[in-house]
Amino acid sequence: MNLIYIADPMCSWCYGFGKPMDALLAEPGDAAPLQLALVMGGLRPYTTETLAPSTADEIFGHWRHVHEASGQPFASAPHTALHESGFVYDTEPASRATVTVRMLSPRNVWRYFKAVQQAFYAEGRNVTRPELLADLAEQQGLPRAEFASAFDSDAMRDATRADFAQSQAWGVRGFPTLLAEHEGALHVVTRGYLAEDALRSRLAALS
């Protein structure tokens, strides 16, 4: 069974969903080994407005719900990128960085995606910054200069837009969304966060 995971590295529920997905990919259970395709959905791409403090507080409140549901660690306010002066919540750079790693080193893309999430949510770092995204790629063993050149290319910008367009063509309106390709057809596994047991149950029903 092939899984298609439509997500955004700056989507908090996608961050929460990382633990069930990790468990599933590590030990698929009774099913055959799973193949994962990671597609960027586009949560807030191309945003240009500075995040207002009141909006930052509202979003941070949603993060608390994710923490309660998933147990994932979050930086405490005001030590988050949300509360950084002048922060613009544009998810395109982090998405483009993930697409870049997917092109340069597909076997590292899931680890890189999680590294961006860890930096943003748990460490409170601003992952809209190209230099930080390059740091994270280098930590995954990618040549920094090669990553930076590809990340800044029109080809990667176009590939990222293509991911967003594919997500819309599938009718995906929220993240995380997990699809399963089974016997030539696409099936929706979940639109939104699921705990590990529920996730396994839904996949078992398809196999």
Image (spheres, rainbow, N blue to C red):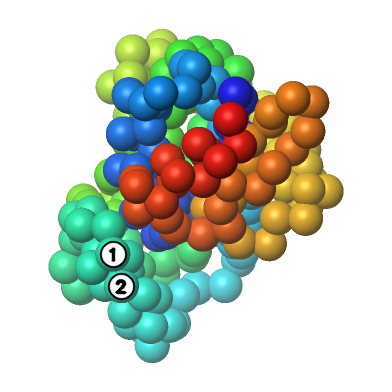
Count of marks, rendered view: 2
Q: Residue at x 44, y 57 (%)?
A: 193
Most distant residue in the bottom direction: 54
Q: Quadrant of residue 81?
A: bottom left
Please state, as top left, top right, bottom left or bottom right, where the C terminus lies in the image. top right
Q: Quadrant of residue 79?
A: bottom left
Q: Residue at x 50, y 36 (%)?
A: 204
Closer to us: 99 or 22 = 22
Residue 92 seen from this side = no
Q: Residue at x 61, y 61 (%)?
A: 174
Please state, as top left, top right, bottom left or bottom right, where the N terminus lies in the image. top right
Q: Which mark is residue 65?
A: 2
Circles 1 and 2: CB atoms closer than 8 Å: yes
Residue 77 seen from this side = yes
> x and y percent of residue 3 in the render?
58, 31
Q: Is residue 92 above or below residue 142?
A: below
Report helix, strand or loop for mark 2: helix
> x and y percent of residue 84 in the render?
31, 67
Closer to us: 198 or 177 = 198
Closer to us: 97 or 108 = 108
Q: Amino acid at mark 2?
A: His
Return the residue at label 1: 69
